[in-house]
Amino acid sequence: MGLDLKPGDIIFLDTAPFIYFFKKHPEYFPALELFFNNLYETGAQAITSIITYIELTTHPARSGKHQLVRKYRDYLSHSENISLFPLNMDIADYVVDIRAKYHFKTPDAIQIGTAISCGADCIITNDKSWRRCEAIGVVLVEDL
């Protein structure tokens, strides 16, 4: 499938794509590397939520890899084409709607609600269950 990125596109990234990219997952890294290169070349924007930061850094923190936690924090906080959004009341209203309509668990609903609230064109995840959300397009990493 892939994504044809254009300037002004806003793509929400779930946690899994970041994990696959940072850990150079043998199956998914090449497609994600191409995605990130295209993101920077086109000037498109990637966004994610504070949930991604929490999920991405919990395991390294638990393992005492505080330098890696800092590296992930810096990457998500200071990348030119990636924005990290905190949870706020506007996003929370979308989260409530997503949970009520689709019965997602709170972390997943926060991810999806953030994407919708922030005007994302689509979401990249590897969670097939997210496809049942009709409010936004969902692209699986395996389809990149």
Image: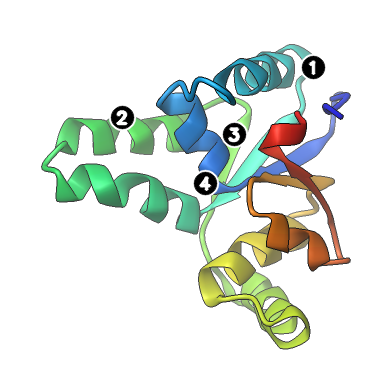
Identify the mark at residue 71; answer none if there is no mark.
Answer: 2
SS for callout 2: helix
In the rendered image, the vertical position of residue 144 relative to residue 133, given as above or below: above
In this figure, which residue is indicated by the disc labeled 1?
42
In this figure, which residue is indicated by the disc labeled 3?
82
Sequence-wise first label, 1 or 2: 1
Query: Is mark 2 in CB contact (under 8 Å) with mark 3?
Result: no
Crowd rating for badge 4 (residues with CA inside 10 Å; few <14, some 14–19, many 20+): many
Query: Which mark's residue is nearer the viewer, 4 or 3?
Result: 4
Going 71% across and 22% down the picture, which residue do you hit?
Answer: 39
Sequence-wise first label, 1 or 4: 4
Q: Amino acid at mark 3?
A: Ile
Going 60% across and 16% down the picture, which residue do you hit?
Answer: 33
Q: Amino acid at mark 1?
A: Thr
Going 68% across and 17% down the picture, which residue do you hit?
Answer: 40
The part of the image, by quadrant, that contains residue 46 is top right
Residue 117 % position (x, y): 74, 63
In the rendered image, the vertical position of residue 30 relative to residue 75, given as above or below: above
Query: Which mark's residue is nearer the viewer, 2 or 4?
Result: 4
Query: Is mark 4 in CB contact (under 8 Å) with mark 3?
Result: no
In this figure, which residue is indicated by the disc labeled 4?
15
Sequence-wise first label, 4 or 3: 4
In the rendered image, the vertical position of residue 87 relative to residue 85, given as above or below: below
What's the coloring here?
A: rainbow
Going 81% across and 66% down the picture, which residue do you hit?
Answer: 132
In the rendered image, the vertical position of residue 11 relative to residue 4, given as above or below: below
SS for callout 1: helix
